[in-house]
Image (tube, helix red, strand yellow):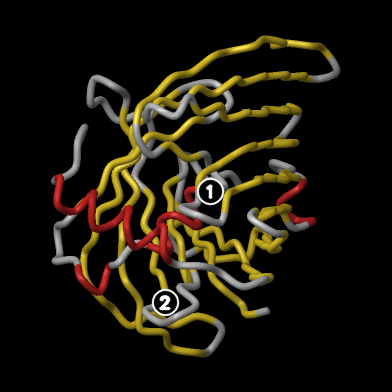
Amino acid sequence: MKIKRKCLALLSAALLGTAAAAAMQFNDESLSYKVNYKWGLIHKQAGHATLTLKNDGPYYYAQLTAASEPWADRFFEVRDTLNGVIKRDGFVPIFYEKIAHEGGEDKHDTVTFIYDGNNKVRGECTRHVVKKGKERVNQKIELEAEGMTVDMMSAYYYMRALPYENWKPGQTETITIFSGKRKEALTIKYHGTEDVKADKKTFRCYHITFIFTSDGGKKTSDDMDAWISADGRRIPVRLEGKLPVGKVHCVYTGQ
């Protein structure tokens, strides 16, 4: 199943969040998840995913792989791989790639990030879409932004590193996110701490919401909620998103 992906946060929150994100570091890790589909009384595992991170000098090499279960393949087969190269200092993205097979459609998106040293960011994007064996899209797109800018891989690590222990419920930070096709504002809203069960364990977590909007402030997709462990590892324990019918839950199952 596929998870669907104001405009400035409070200045104090943005400064505090950026400083902490720049200071925090992650060790090599491999995090496993089960993807559950819920609609009414139906609650069944529909897929699985693995998030890995490796340190290599000044860079992180990150990868997310996801696949639907055999029973779900009959309705909507998913085989997705996201790759990212990220600077360890500040979680600044260098390269992003999405290789996706979803239903009868194959996509290959890339974003190369270029920095001019004056707080400006340029994303050189390529998109290639093939549906039912026929090429539908083959294009290059250039995106521009100022300030902190992420992609769908570096966003995971940036949001994990924010200093939620110093935030108050309702506090937000907004940054820019590039996909292979557009620029969006990504607002991270903090709700406080909650106890969350995953894999028969209970984690104390920071609850946050991802809000995606266009430059004009219009929502570009449904919100997504995440619960991040309130410890030194900052593990994404649970993520929830809406589908056209039902919801999808990604639940941490350990290493």
Q: Secondary structure at mark 1?
A: helix
Q: Is residue 124 above or below residue 163?
A: above
Q: Secondary structure at mark 2?
A: strand
Q: Earlier in the sequence, mark 1 or mark 2?
A: 1
Label of residue 154 in the image:
1
> Is 33 in front, or is 182?
182
- Which residue ends up furthest to the right in the rendered image? 133
- Which residue ends up furthest to the front in the rendered image? 117
Label of residue 229 in the image:
2
The answer to which quarter of the image holds residue 32 is: bottom right
Q: Quadrant of the C terminus?
A: bottom right
| Crowd class of label 2 (few under 14; some 14 to 19; many from 20; radius 10 Å) | many
* Amino acid carrying mark 1 in the image: Ser
> Is 236 in front, or is 73?
236
Give the Cα distance between marks 1 and 2.
18 Å
Residue at position x 76%, y 19% from top? Answer: 131
The picture places residue 140, in percent across and down from the top left corner, at: 64, 11
Residue at position x 40%, y 25% from top? Answer: 120
* Amino acid carrying mark 2 in the image: Ser
Q: Is residue 8 above or below residue 52?
A: above
Residue at position x 23%, y 26% from top? Answer: 217
The picture places residue 224, in percent across and down from the top left corner, at: 38, 50
| Crowd class of label 1 (few under 14; some 14 to 19; many from 20; radius 10 Å) | many
- Which residue ends up furthest to the bottom in the rendered image? 201
Q: Are marks 1 and 2 in contact (CB under 8 Å)?
A: no
Q: Nearer the viewer, mark 1 or mark 2?
A: 1
Relative to residue 195, is residue 46 drawn left or right?
right
The answer to which quarter of the image holds residue 126 is: top right
Residue at position x 32%, y 57% from top? Answer: 19
